[in-house]
């Protein structure tokens, strides 16, 4: 089955630790995206990548880093510099940017 | 800056019709997308308008007026399973990321 997967579904970390969220797709999409969603809020763009080995910052990139070494994979690292990391993180991919396919999300809690 | 405005909440009963509006002020505009998200789930794509007019997909339709910087999502024959959040999103340029509104929570009651 084609799709986009994120792991883990729930993640708990102590403040001050870096954590990496996984995102994998087998849809053969060139573009991949990371969004953050806070309760009652819309999706805010963290980073996106239109092609392997290239990525652009979104509106809230500070405290996050990404890599795009393979077409299928776009991991997101939440660093200790991110002041409010507790959130729901959604990864997406697309052929055309207007129709994005989302993974199930990772709910990160930092205490 | 970029802004998309949509109502925060809408309520309706089963079988009714509901319209969710979206107005946008953005530095560019290539098209308007709509997504549905059930509580705790992943957003799913519903429709896209690049040109003025109405696009119909089953019970859902979406409308765009580029001159008014306005669009809406129309949901007909509402069902309980339509209770969800609905997001409008602007595509500033082809191939770039979307800018999402804050979402409208639709509650459908029997």
Image: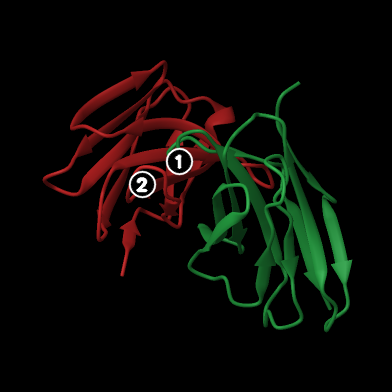
Chain colours: A green, B red
User: Which structural element holds mark 1?
Assistant: loop
**In the picture, which quadrant includes the C terminus of chain B?**
top right
Q: Position of residue A29 (x, y in %)?
A: 59, 34
Whether labels 2 and 1 share one chain: no
What residue sits 67% from the left and 83% below the top? Answer: A83
The numbered dot on residue A97 is 1
Residue A96 locus on image (x, y percent)? 45, 35
Of the pair B35 and B84, the residue shown nearer to us: B35
Return the mark for residue B91: 2
The reply to whether dot 2 and dot 1 touch (C-beta < 8 Å) is yes
User: Please, is residue A82 above or below residue B64 in the view?
Assistant: below
Left or right of B39, for residue B35: left
Q: Where residue A87 appears, x then y in whole percent?
A: 69, 65
The answer, for residue A41, to whether it is visible in the render is no
Distance from label 2 to label 1 (Cα)?
7 Å
Q: Is residue B45 visible?
A: yes
Q: Is residue B59 above or below residue A66?
A: above
């Amino acid at each position: 089955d084609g799709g986009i997967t994120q792991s883990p579904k729930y993640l708990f970390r102590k403040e001050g630790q870096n954590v990496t969220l996984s995102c994998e797709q087998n849809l053969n999409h060139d573009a991949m995206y990371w969004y953050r969603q806070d309760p009652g809020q819309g999706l805010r763009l963290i980073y996106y990548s239109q092609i392997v080995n290239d990525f652009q910052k979104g509106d809230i990139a500070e405290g996050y880093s990404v890599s795009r070494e393979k077409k299928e994979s776009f991991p997101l690292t939440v660093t200790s510099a991110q002041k409010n990391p507790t959130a729901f993180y959604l990864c997406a991919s697309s052929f055309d940017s207007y129709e994005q396919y989302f993974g199930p999300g990772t709910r990160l809690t930092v205490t | 800056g970029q802004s998309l405005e949509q109502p925060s909440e809408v309520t309706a009963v089963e079988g009714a019709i509901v319209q969710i509006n979206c107005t946008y002020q953005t530095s560019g505009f290539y098209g308007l997308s709509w997504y549905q998200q059930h509580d705790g789930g992943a957003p799913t794509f519903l429709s896209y308008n690049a040109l003025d007019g109405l696009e119909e997909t089953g019970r859902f339709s979406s409308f765009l007026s580029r001159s008014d910087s306005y669009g809406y999502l129309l949901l007909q024959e509402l069902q309980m399973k339509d209770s969800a959040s609905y997001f409008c999103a602007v595509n500033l340029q082809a191939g770039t990321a979307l800018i999402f509104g804050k979402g409208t929570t639709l509650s459908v009651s029997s």
